[in-house]
Image: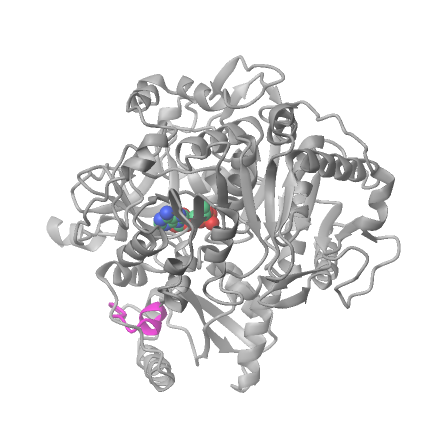
Amino acid sequence: MGAVDEEVQQVSESQIAVHWREEEYYQPPATFIGQANAVDPAIFERFSEEHFPECFKEYADLLTWDEYWHTTLDTSKAPFWKWFVGGRLNASYNCVDRHLATDRNKAALIWVPEPEDAETEAITYQELYRRVNEFAALLRDFGGVETGDRVTFHLPMVPELPVSMLACARLGVIHSQVFGGFSGAACGGRIADSQSKILVTMDGYYRNGELVDHKVKADEAVERAREEGVEVEKVLVWRRHAGEYASQSPMVEGRDFFVDEIMPDYRDQLVEPVSMPAEAPLFIMYSSGTTGRPKGCQHSTGGYLAYVAGTSKYYQDIHPEDTYWCAADIGWITGHSYIVYGPLALGTTSVMYEGVPTYPDAGRVWRIAERLGVTIFHTAPTTIRMLRKLGPDEPAKYDYRFKHMTTVGEPIEPDVWRWYHDVVGKGEAVIVDTWWQTENGGFLGSTLPALHPMKPGSCGPAVLGIYPVINDEDGNVVEAGSGRAGNICIRNPWPGIFQTIWGDPDRFVETYYEKYNRDKNSTDWRDWPYFANDGAVQAADGYFRILGRVDDVINVAGHRLGTKELESAAITVEEIAEAAAVPVIDEIRGRAVEMYVSLKPGYEESPDVVNKVTKAIETEIGKIARPKSVWIVADMPKTRSGKIMRRVIAGISNFTDVGDVSTLANPEIVDDIRHHVQSEKVARGEQPRELSAEEMKEIQAFGQAE
Ligand code: WTA
């Protein structure tokens, strides 16, 4: 083979040229610029590489420190970076106590219950202070937790969630909130991994007009944790309506306790905030990866809080007088950073909504915005798509005015972006498209809203103090404007970066740093670029367009689902021999999951098996992961070494070219599967629209990471 052929052979996804129309710029409105926190371009100079890492003092100085740090960045144990070493602070003090002197009667949180006739609850900083202290006292004296212990929460979108988080932070206890929509089993796995002795949950919550039973999941969680060797000592159950019980599941004597029944013992108690080293972990947030168990991303106290405060100020443009509404769930990193810690550190009013954005109709979100006078609105493309589909003209009917809007979690189609801008923002609001990850603590890519024009579909340049590079597979730099995609990496550490994977430092290094590390003994940060596991392309103007995961994670409505987790769940079904999960393009959720399964010998294909697989995935992971279809196949397309070729079945599911199958061990199976799946899809009316070039590439590259 000649050199040229060889080159063609070795072209990987990261080197494939990407072509699309360059979108037009939108300028930030003058009214926004006039009031913005960051309006002087000198800020770029302050955060330029020559001022790194000291530039981040500007963020850390937004906090109140018990002791000032002596070393801004310690790289001696690379890539386990230490920020603000020597500094001490308490996150709960920073988010609550320090605002009391000037703002005790201002709303810290405004909570909107899902039932529309229920009263909105405004919780002042003083009230929050009381509740946080009382629950901290209860956790410490009744729960028996100590500084450094882990406590798992499985809570819905209720004020008790930020109260619980801040109570832990007050004690220096590490919280681990599991998204309320996840199953009991998924929660149990995370309890075991973090070795939590206490689970904090709620009896029920409102979702789509129903009071759903949530406590039942706690029993499953405790059971699963026990199977994995961790015994939960106490389950603390908040009640959605104090004094009434919304669950069918019995309370276990000596293990389960209603918080509202014990709370009177702790009434008016105050707990001194524990002064924590900047480097002490504040929380763990689990996130799905390519293989194996979800990764517990461990975030620090000082670096994390400084980073979310700084980015909330400059990128969310939060002023103390704003009414800020991030409609994410606190069960995800977005909610931790940009509902709770960032906004409260800045002393603003943060809105929380319990329920579904389209309940009872597509005008709900805009009614909330109007009623509360929301000025900053923050949501995800999947919600924007859904609101556009169900109520394209609704926003115009309501009298709210946003100055600023955010999109986060997955790439947004330029067309959807324009609806967000023109209809939701009424042409008056600036938009930031913020690219980042659970691992990152805060934003990595975004326009600085008063200083950069917006470009639909691009997150913009890197944020202040972040110096990215796009590398090809071999570590060569892919130039901006070349039209080529590659792996986006961040060349430098930043204060919000997670500290490690809880209990698995080797996997931390391996997943994020090994690929582009230049010398594993080096203590120079320049040798340790952070590999984000996202594909991206950089335009000539420096703006990044994020293409999605290069590993096999399926991003459903902004939630990362690992293929391995889905497949392991399917395999728990007795009849299933093998399983493969693939993404299909979905108009609302971005991507949806399809499962392919083959049966063990002696079992018959039946609708029952399909239901069992669906149920298993709901039980192991949660309803959000429910597959759109489960296809039973005689065998999976496999390589000669026996690996399932996911790209081939992904191609079938999406009606795209399956590529070269001649090297498969069983190429003949491909046509059988294609015929079976595609004719059924046509019969159901599930043929996708024509895919864009990028979508096609994503599907064709799926499964290549292994
Ligand atoms: C994707 C959510 C395009 C990306 C904060 C990333 C995005 C993964 C964007 C992280 C965006 C997030 N544009 N893609 N603005 N934001 N992503 O950990 O693939 O839940 O790696 O964090 O979502 O998802 P995670």
Compared with 686, 564 (above or below) is above
Quarter of the figure with the C terminus:
bottom left
Q: Residue at x 52, y 48 (%)?
A: 372
> Residue 455's x, y, as percent?
25, 45
Compared with 169, 157 (above or below) is below
Q: Report whether 582 appears left or right of 103.
A: left
Q: Does 77 lie within the magenta span?
A: no
Residue 472 visible from this viewpoint: no
Q: Residue at x 73, y 39 (%)?
A: 131
Q: Report whether 249 appears left or right of 678.
A: right
Quarter of the figure with the N terminus:
bottom left
> Residue 342's x, y, as percent?
52, 35
> Residue 405's x, y, as percent?
39, 46
> Residue 156's x, y, as percent?
63, 54
Residue 262 visible from this viewpoint: yes
Q: Does 656 lie within the magenta span?
A: yes
Count of numbered circles on the image: 0
Q: Report whether 222 appears left or right of 651.
A: right
> Which quarter of the picture shows residue 355?
bottom right
* Range of magenta residues: 649-660
Q: Nearer the viewer, residue 243 or 677?
A: 243
Q: Residue at x 67, y 66 (%)?
A: 211
Compared with 431, 205 (above or below) is below
Q: How is the image coloured?
A: one colour
> Which quarter of the picture shows residue 389?
bottom left
